Amino acid sequence: MLSRVRWFAIGVILVPTIAHAQGRAWTPEISIGAGLGHVFRWEDRSYGDRTNAGAGVAIVHSSGWAFEVHADRTFGLDPSLAPCGVVNVTCVGVAHEGPTSMTVASINARYHFTKHRLQPYLIGGLGLLWSRSLHSLTQVQGAIAVITELHSRDSGFGPELGAGLRLPIGRGWSVNGELRWLDAPWLSRQNLAITRVVAHATYTVRHSP
């Protein structure tokens, strides 16, 4: 967990610094948001829709391009009860299966298509996903099957894609509605993916005259 905090803190410090060094064409911004995260694994199942919250920092160019560091976490994941899976025996014990927590950090490019008041944009980049999960283990001993619960941690990375709409509301503030999708199977044992539908409040740091 500490490494993730350090990784995001570097982005928080570095992105505005780069924007300042590049001059007035680049503008730094910060955002916070909340919504829903849909956690799933392509090959077998979904783990439901849960509360998601996150934050990000970015530098935005006057041409419409932007580069961001973003992080979010999905809360309240509830692993399901694992079935016994063995017939003609007596099952003893209780176990659960599925993720219990999920954190995402990503580096993305954005492109804003218009200078009009309502601004659509696309997102593309690379995301990292850290998860904790519960698993069941069944051991048969004669006529009894003993079910035990195991804990595991996993990490993976993969492409992040998304789209959004931005509505400026004055004095450097805007509200954004976003859809983000991350598939993180690379170097992962769990092969988890997540789709987030979130609303952001964004503050753009304007240059002084």
Image (spheres, rainbow, N blue to C red):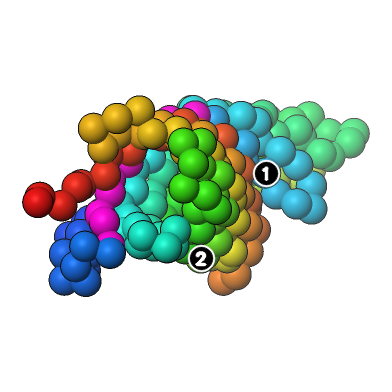
Whether residue 14 is visible: no
Q: For the residue marked with disc 1, what is the amino acid?
A: Phe
29 magenta-colored: yes
Dot 1: what SS? strand
Question: How many residues crowd around disc 1 within 10 Å: few (fewer than 14), some, or many (20 or more)?
Answer: many
Q: Is residue 38 above or below residue 1?
A: above
Q: Which residue is drawn at 51% across and 65% down?
A: 126
Whether residue 22 is visible: yes
Question: How many residues crowd around disc 2 within 10 Å: few (fewer than 14), some, or many (20 or more)?
Answer: some
Q: Which residue is drawn at 60% across and 70% down?
A: 186
Q: Residue at x 56, y 71 (%)?
A: 187
User: Which residue corresponds to mark 2?
Assistant: 126
The range drawn in magenta is: 26-35
Please state if 2 lies on the left or on the right of 190 as rendered. left
Q: Residue at x 51, y 36 (%)?
A: 118
Q: For the residue marked with disc 2, what is the amino acid?
A: Leu
Tell me where residue 61 sits by quadrant.
bottom left
Q: Distance between the residues labelled 1 and 2?
A: 18 Å
Q: Residue 31 carries which label?
A: none
Please state if 165 lies on the left or on the right of 39 as rendered. left
| Image location of residue 88, percent across then percent down | 90, 34
User: Which residue corresponds to mark 1?
Assistant: 40
Mark whose residue sits in front, 1 or 2: 2
| Image location of residue 125, percent across then percent down | 52, 64
| Image location of residue 60, percent across then percent down | 35, 58
Dot 2: what SS? strand
112 magenta-colored: no
